[in-house]
């Protein structure tokens, strides 16, 4: 194995210098490659291959690709969305990938009619809307194909009701309304975006018997209170609307009618859950508005003053409402139908001489569909992925053959509920049980600050990749990442809820080490890690980004605010591609189970503390024993990962099995689709990860016997993982 690996690399290295010259990048501009990298028995050959790859992704081409992808609005299932699928497929083919477009049939809505009218007690009209999104000088806003602001998965209806303001719509916000003696039953709840996933706002409002939900963007969260609004700056202008799905993805993501199975086009309706019975389908009507439209409602609300933290940045004192001072007439007609969506996949066969498990796939993906133009979300990620594929295509032409199968994926209908990725993952579940990694990017570039979230076993892997990639700011991406975290920690914390896909991690890391967040939800890695136990990462480059899911997330905004020369696109392509390249070729899978064990031990300690604070007593003795044994086994296996072995392929199968051992086939209580015992999206947070979710959610519900049982489930998972590691020690 070791020898084959070296031999099959020799011929293509000759071309390395040539492609460096062609790309106009002298070897001196690349950081000095490391002497050794965890997982590679000898890094010399790989270091040359890496330099060959890094020379290819091109900033100018990425800019052209982004421009093409975002030329028209391309919401999932539209003609324009299909055109982007064909474009991506062409690029995959040109790079030499075996390319396929796979359709799925899924239940989606589009807005037929959205109408809001607010009147005061005397019947005087305060506002009619929604107002179209408009700023002076934007060249994209008037396209007739722009879908008006709406919420995916909203119910339809026609109601007139008083309005109650409920801050971010968190459980504690509704509890505060209880304390004020204000019921939301039968009323329309007005909440602001931020702090949690909008589907959670809808879920709680529905549970509390609200008749409707209106979600607006307060300027304090992503508007003028943060900085200059578009077109002067990157923040949300007064008419900007954040579209978005309210699907109950914390129950299960993907097509609402096919939990756990693939929504293939030939799946008969008899095997689908009727949409009105689907657990992930909201029953409440909900729509998003701008602060231009929310302002007259909020200003007239009356009722008690809000608690100080509920005050936003509009120029008057906020009140809770609940009186008849404002009556809102809300008409939503949502058109629902089965819609065809299209995933594009590009396959690279493994070297026929490879001894690796044939299912040890390396999967890398990004969604392609956008609420409107999606320059940042998601096509900055798509352009970067296309340039990564471009680089890998050059290696293929030079004769490179990966040790493991590589599949690049362009997902559809992520915005409506992570649908394209979930359906594909459910269809390929059997193979993915052996997949060695899923690498995600969604918001690829919104600014210059690299950031990542990952399963603990891959955190050091991500760091090692970024040490090889040059930063446009000088030095390596890793160095700039550490620097931006040191400088920007408070800013990122303050902006919590908007770039919530990569939540900051509270974990203590070594001094000066880049912190990597935990995987919650909000992007396409969910099915891979949380349903199937495929180790995953999510990467991107962040900056001030206030136009999320609005018409203004377009090419013009992007070149004015995010990355005018596309150098962060190039950086993103290099990091993303290098993740794939290393995982495809590594001799020994570079999973770091020692870090995993440490993090799980922290989670168990934190749960004990949390129980204690609630006056509950959680017995963590067996769980601590299990995690300490797991840690010792991880240390022993780490030594084996570091030393040359006779049969790396057999070791790799065991190493991969460990993540699978952390799945519980029964899933979480009430949420059987979520099988991972360590990570899930929170039922009441949505984007942010809940760690050891079975335990923590039972503690949140003050159900100590369920918490104890769920800790037993975690303990059993750790014991399975330990047994696997021990069998890998010999
Ligand atoms: Zn996205």
Image (cartoon, rainbow, N blue to C red):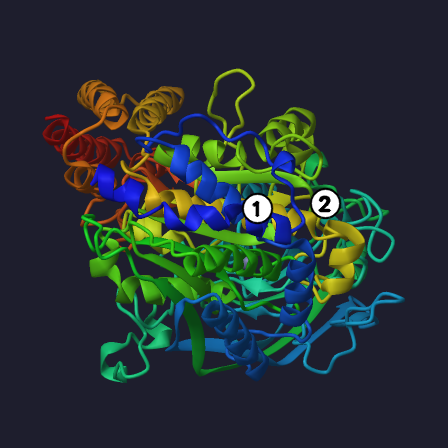
Q: Ligand 1 quadrant? A: bottom right
Secondary structure of the residue carrying numbered label 1: strand
Cα–Cα gap, marks 1 and 2: 13 Å
Residue occupying the point 51% across, 52% down:
441
Q: Is mark 1 within 8 Å of ligand 1?
A: no
Q: Nearer the viewer, residue 693 or 43?
A: 43
On residue 544, the disc is: 2
Quarter of the figure that contains the N terminus: top left
State left or right for residue 112 relative to residue 710. right
Q: Which of labels 1 and 2 is toward the front?
A: 1
Q: Is residue 687 left or right of residue 384?
A: left
- At 88% across and 67% down in the image, what residue appears? 137
- Residue under label 1, please give it: 540
Residue 635 percent coordinates (x, y): 25, 20
In this rendering, position of residue 46 left or right of residue 724: right
Viewport quadrant of the C terminus: top left
Q: Secondary structure at mark 2?
A: loop
Q: Is residue 206 visible?
A: no
Residue 250 versus residue 68 in the image, above or below: above
Is residue 423 depicted above or below 168 in this figure?
below
- Mark 2: few/some/many CA within 10 Å (<14, 14-19, 20+): many
> Which picture quadrant has residue 728?
top left
Residue pictured at 78% horizontal, 66% vertical: 121
Residue 70 x %, y %: 66, 69
Name which residue lies at 65% across and 37% down: 29
Up/down of 369 relative to 391, above or below: below
């Amino acid at each position: 194995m070791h020898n084959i690996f070296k031999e099959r690399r020799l011929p293509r290295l000759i071309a390395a210098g040539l492609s460096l010259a062609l790309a106009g990048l002298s070897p001196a501009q690349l950081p000095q490659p490391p002497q050794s990298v965890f997982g590679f028995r000898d890094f010399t050959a790989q270091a040359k291959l890496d330099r060959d790859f890094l020379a290819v992704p091109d900033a100018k081409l990425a800019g052209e690709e982004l421009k093409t992808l975002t030329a028209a609005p391309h919401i999932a299932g539209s003609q324009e969305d299909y055109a982007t699928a064909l474009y991506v497929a062409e690029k995959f083919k040109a790079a030499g990938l075996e390319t396929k477009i796979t359709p799925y049939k899924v239940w989606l809505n589009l807005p037929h009619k959205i109408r809001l009218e607010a009147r005061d007690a005397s019947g005087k009209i305060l506002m009619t809307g929604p107002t179209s999104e408009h700023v002076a000088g934007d060249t994209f806003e008037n396209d007739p194909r722009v879908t008006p602001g709406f919420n995916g998965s909203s119910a339809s209806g026609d109601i007139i009701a008083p309005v109650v303001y409920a801050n971010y719509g968190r459980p504690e916000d509704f509890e505060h309304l209880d304390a004020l003696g204000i019921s939301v039953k039968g009323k329309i709840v007005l909440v602001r975006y931020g702090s949690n996933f909008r589907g959670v706002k809808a879920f709680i409002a529905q549970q509390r018997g609200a008749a409707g939900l209106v979600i607006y963007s307060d300027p304090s969260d992503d508007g003028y209170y943060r900085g200059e609004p578009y077109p002067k700056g990157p923040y949300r202008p007064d008419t900007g609307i954040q579209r978005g799905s309210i699907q109950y993805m914390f129950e299960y993501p993907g097509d609402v009618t096919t939990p756990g199975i693939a929504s293939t086009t030939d799946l008969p309706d008899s095997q689908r859950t009727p949409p009105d019975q689907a657990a992930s389908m909201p029953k409440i009507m909900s729509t998003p508005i701008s602060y231009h439209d929310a302002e007259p409602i909020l200003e007239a609300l009356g009722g008690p003053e809000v608690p100080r933290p509920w005050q936003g940045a509009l120029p008057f004192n906020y009140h809770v409402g609940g009186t008849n001072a404002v009556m809102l007439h809300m008409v939503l007609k949502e058109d629902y139908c089965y819609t065809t969506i299209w995933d594009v996949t590009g396959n690279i066969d493994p070297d026929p001489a490879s001894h690796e498990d044939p299912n040890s796939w390396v999967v890398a993906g990004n969604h392609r569909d956008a609420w409107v133009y999606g320059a940042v979300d998601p096509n900055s990620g798509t352009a970067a992925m296309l340039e990564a594929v471009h680089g890998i295509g050059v290696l293929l032409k030079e004769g490179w053959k990966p040790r493991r199968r590589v599949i690049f994926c362009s997902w559809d209908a992520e915005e409506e509920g992570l649908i394209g990725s979930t359906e594909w993952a459910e269809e390929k579940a059997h193979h993915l049980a052996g997949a060695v990694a899923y690498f995600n990017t969604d918001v690829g570039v919104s600014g210059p600050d690299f950031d990542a979230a990952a399963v603990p076993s891959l955190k050091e892997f991500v760091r090692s990749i970024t040490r090889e990639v040059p930063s446009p700011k000088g030095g390596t991406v890793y160095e700039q990442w550490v620097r931006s975290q040191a400088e920007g920690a408070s800013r990122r914390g303050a902006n919590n809820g908007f770039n919530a896909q990569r939540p900051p991690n509270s974990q203590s890391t070594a001094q000066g080490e880049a912190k990597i967040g935990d995987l919650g939800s909000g992007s396409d890695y969910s099915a891979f890690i949380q349903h199937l136990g495929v180790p995953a990462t999510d990467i991107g480059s962040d900056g001030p980004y206030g136009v999320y899911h609005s018409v203004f997330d377009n090419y013009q905004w992007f070149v004015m605010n995010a990355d005018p020369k596309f150098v962060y696109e190039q950086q993103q392509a290099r990091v993303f591609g290098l993740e794939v390249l290393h995982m495809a070729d590594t001799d020994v899978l570079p999973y770091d189970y020692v870090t995993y064990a440490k993090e799980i031990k922290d989670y168990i300690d934190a749960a004990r503390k949390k129980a204690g604070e609630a006056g509950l007593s959680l017995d963590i003795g067996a769980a601590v024993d299990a995690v300490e044994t797991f840690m010792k086994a991880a240390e022993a296996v780490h030594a084996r990962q570091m030393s040359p072995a006779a049969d790396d392929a057999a070791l790799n199968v065991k190493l991969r099995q460990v993540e699978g051992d952390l799945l519980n086939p029964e899933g979480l209580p009430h949420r059987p689709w979520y099988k991972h015992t360590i990570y899930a999206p929170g039922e009441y947070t949505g984007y942010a990860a809940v760690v050891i979710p079975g335990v923590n959610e039972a503690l949140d519900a003050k159900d100590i016997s369920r918490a104890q049982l769920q800790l037993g489930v975690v303990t059993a998972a750790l014991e399975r993982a330990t047994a696997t590691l021990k069998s890998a020690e010999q």
